[in-house]
Amino acid sequence: MKEKLIQEISTAMAEVLSFEQVAHLNSVLLQVVSQYTITEDGETLHENAASNDRLLDIFLSAKQVEGCTTPTIKYYGSTIRQLFKKMPKKVTDYTTEDIRAYLAVFQRKNKSSKVTIDNIRRIFSSFFAWLEEEDYIVKSPVRRIHKVKTGTQVKEVLSDENIEQLRDSCTKIRDLAIIDLLASTGMRVGELVKLNREDINFTERECIVFGKGNKERIVYFNARAKIHLQQYLSSRKDRNKALFVSLAKPHKRLEISGVETRLRKIGRTAKIVRVHPHKFRRTLATMAIDKGMPVEQVQRLLGHVKIDTTMHYAMVNQNNVKLSHRKFIN
């Protein structure tokens, strides 16, 4: 490779240098380049990519050991690989300016929200902090990139009337049971689809779900959900152990996308916009806090590690704020 480089330089300079000068140039170049390792750009990129991918795989394995879910690990991996693709260099060579530039370009090109950009920043921060802890780099380039300030949005919840309209729009007992279970437990849709028949305790009106990081917790459902669940299970002819299955044969376990699609369809029938499983969860949190349930208990009910997350979910009813103001301030 070194000889090839010297030959190319000599050939390019031959037109302006004499034979003796070219010979002297060759001698000087040989002395200088002997002190360095030289590779072609393509080889360097390939080596960088191999090194980066290896470190990323080790990092993702570490996150798996820590208990991160498969979707989370996939999201981490795809986000970091995008950085490698758009800025192909050794992971040890990334600077704070590189990361800032990447985030700025990403936001501009994709018209991403501040929340999305901060999520990407957090993933980069986790990755480079791990590299620092494991002594692959001296200092994380994300240290000086602070949390992106995001505005607080009042997210919609379902009113009692909305939930009744959704119930009235159900044509299948399965869908009615799903809506009642989501509305009364506040469980995640990912937890819902993992439930088996044997997980339901009808006597105590409770069931055990496995949340993020496979954390186990008990959730409770109301009498209405109990009745509709029993009716649904009694109507089934299949032997699938899953609590909820597809309507068509071979009656496979219902997936997250299946629940989301069905709820959107029911929402359109009821003329309610943006109906999705998470809305029931947010509605339960808001309703519970509105009715005076201690926020610590709501946190436990929803399976949140941090109470801040619970407060982010629960939007206090503005009418209650108004009444409290009149009661305590006026």
Image (tube, rainbow, N blue to C red):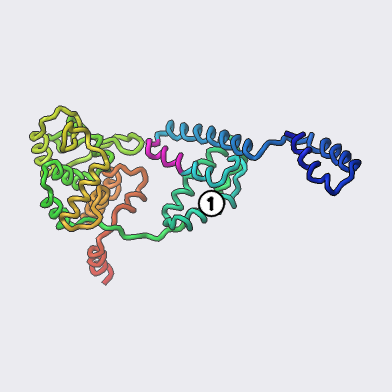
Q: Position of residue 79 (x, y in %)?
A: 46, 44
Which residue shows up at 23% across the image and 65% down it? 319
Please name the residue shown 31% across and 38% down the image.
Answer: 211
Question: Is the magenta region chiefly helix, strand or loop?
Answer: helix
Q: Is residue 77 magenta?
A: yes
| Total residue callouts | 1
Give the position of the N terminus as an image quadrant: top right
Image coordinates for residue 298, horizontal then vertical, percent? 27, 47
In the image, is 62 to the left or to the right of 252?
A: right
Q: Amino acid at mark 1?
A: Tyr
Where does label 1 land, which residue?
102
Quarter-of-image position of residue 159: bottom left
Magenta stretch: give its range.
68-78
Does 130 sit above or below residue 239? below
Name the foreground residue: 289 vs 131. Answer: 131
Q: Nearer the viewer, residue 288 or 215?
A: 215
Furthest toward the front, the residue is 15
- Name the one closer to the observer, 21 or 179: 21
Q: Where 94 sits versus 195, above or below? A: below
Q: Quadrant of residue 10?
A: top right
Q: Is residue 312 left or right of residue 144?
A: left
